[in-house]
Amino acid sequence: MKLVTWNVNGLRASLRKGMLNWVSEYSPDILCLQEIKAKPEQIDQSNMEQMEQTFSQITWNPAERPGYSGVATLARRAPLEIELGFDRPEYDVEGRAIISQYPGFVLFNLYVPHGRHDHSRVPYKLKFYERLLDICDELHSQGKHIILCGDINTSHKEIDLRNPKQNAKTSGFLLEERIWIDHFLEHGFVDVFRHLYPERVQYTWWTYRMNARERNVGWRLDYFFVSESLLDRVQDLITNDDILGSDHCPVTLLIDA
């Protein structure tokens, strides 16, 4: 099975840049999109028809605020059950999660909040992590296997961003944010990329400013975490950093599921 996560930083803009050409050629089984910044009725009809021809199940969870946040999960095979959000209005109004239950795993499509440059949303972000981990702990206690993917909005270790020392006080690399990734790993999850490629320097996001992508001044913000119980089914993790169309690149998990 081929699962792809991609923060498209505006679905309508990404579609205009030819996103569906790559999707059609690459042929993922499940495509998890973040920061769609649109409701389904705002998508061009021809694009919508093309997506519906490829994916039998398209689940939307847009933010209430226009042009902001939102996630969508596009799947060739319909899940057994779908949940939108965390049953917490303070997060759910921003369209930050879709939970899809399949026979062999539970898939989380996540767009974790940014803490902002002034750190004003860091407490909100940390509470989001806390709520997410509570849900995952409950699913693990039921014997469920979990795949978490999306824009986690935190670089875990110094190897995960180009300039760690200069960004020690920047949201996305704050110690209190990075500790939450430690918590997930302590609660039965594996960071697939870092497990497979412990020394590889590869990023998934680059600011649009200062030719950052051309100079590869980036951050690894987009992840696949899997339950330890799924690790033996993982085939590979591919960072598709040659694919343009957003300030993030797609990331692919290949897994027997």
Image: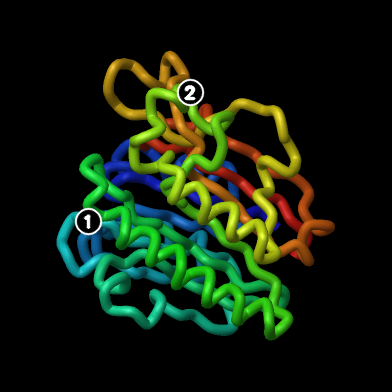
Q: Give the amino acid type for the residue marked by disc 1 in the picture.
A: Tyr
Which residue, as the protein is rendered here, is positioned at the far right? 232
Residue 49 versus residue 179 in the image, above or below: below
Disc 1 secondary structure class: loop
Q: Is residue 52 visible?
A: yes
Q: For the residue carrying disc 2, how many other residues have a C-alpha within 10 Å: few (<14), some (14-19), or many (20+)?
A: some
Q: CA distance from mark 1 to mark 2?
A: 27 Å
Which residue, as the protein is rendered here, is positioned at the far left? 66
In depth, the one of 96 and 163 nearer the eye is: 163
The number of callouts visible is 2
**Quarter of the image with the C terminus in it:** bottom right
Q: Quadrant of residue 64?
A: bottom left
Q: Is residue 44 visible?
A: no
Residue 89 versus residue 229 in the image, above or below: below
Which residue is denoted by mark 2 in the rendering? 162
User: Residue at 65% across / 57% down in the picture?
Assistant: 185
Q: Is residue 163 left or right of residue 193?
A: left
User: Residue at 25% across / 72% down in the picture?
Assistant: 93
Q: Is residue 86 left or right of residue 65?
A: right
In depth, the one of 234 and 128 nearer the eye is: 128
Which residue is denoted by mark 1 in the rendering? 68
Disc 2 secondary structure class: loop
Q: Residue 10 in the image: x percent, y percent?
A: 28, 47
**Quarter of the image with the N terminus in it:** bottom right
Q: Give the amino acid type for the residue marked by disc 2 in the picture.
A: Arg
Labelled pair 1, 2 in contact (Cβ < 8 Å): no
How is the protein colored in the picture?
Answer: rainbow
Decide which of tag 1 and tag 2 comes sooner along the chain: 1
In depth, the one of 174 and 58 nearer the eye is: 174
